[in-house]
Image (cartoon, rainbow, N blue to C red):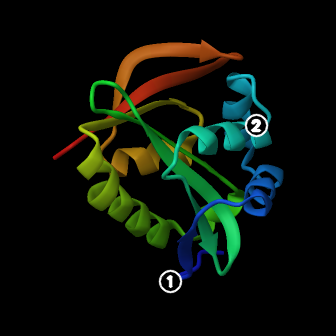
Amino acid sequence: MIKRHEHITFAKPNDEMVRYIADNMREIDKFECMAVNHTPLEGLETSIAVCPDSRVFLADGEPIGAMGSKSLPDGGGVFWLLGTDKINSYPKEFMIKSFDILKNDLMVRYSYLTNCICMEHKESVRWLKKLGAEFMDKKYTLLGREFRQFFIYRG
């Protein structure tokens, strides 16, 4: 069921939130963690540890996803998001809130954002395209699935 009211807030990650997201992570996000030799919990903990701006998305107090970014030496940033299936229950609000973070925070700090994504992750590919992501033609195969690098450029 799609929720139409404003329920998404943000919080600084804590152990309980991180474990909840890891335990309820979307299958495709679990796969992306496995592709880089991490369990869902390791993927979240490692990402949060190197990204001081990490935040958890909460829907009515329930953790539904986490995201963060890390500086690169050339002024860009690595951008990531891992979520539960519930993140898909708030498509419009999630799009508005994530675009606000991108425009008013991340793209102020970074000249571009990048990462790699499994192209079977249809919801995230669609979301990234709406945020302005450009996908590179070069394909990478990890654990038998296609990954591509994306870039989101400032203004």
Residue designated by label 2: 42
Identify the disc placed on residue 6.
Answer: 1
Residue 76 is situated, as x and y percent measured from the top left of the image, at: 31, 33
Identify the disc placed on residue 35.
Answer: none
Residue 102 is situated, as x and y percent measured from the top left of the image, at: 34, 54
Label 2 vs 1, first from the N-terminus:
1
How crowded pointer 2 is (Cα within 10 Å; few <14, some 14-19, many 20+) is rated as some
The residue that appears at 34% across and 64% down in the rendered structure is: 100
Could you say which quadrant of the image residue 110 lies in?
top left
The residue that appears at 56% across and 81% down in the rendered structure is: 7
Q: Quadrant of the N terminus?
A: bottom right
Residues at marks 2 and 1 touching, judged by CB atoms closer than 8 Å:
no
Distance CA(mark 2)–CA(mark 1): 31 Å
The residue that appears at 67% across and 37% down in the rendered structure is: 46
Q: Is residue 61 left or right of residue 112?
A: right
State whether residue 81 is above or below residue 146. below
- Label 2: which secondary element: helix
Residue in front for this viewpoint, 93 or 49: 49
State whether residue 119 is above or below residue 99. above
Could you say which quadrant of the image residue 84 lies in?
bottom right
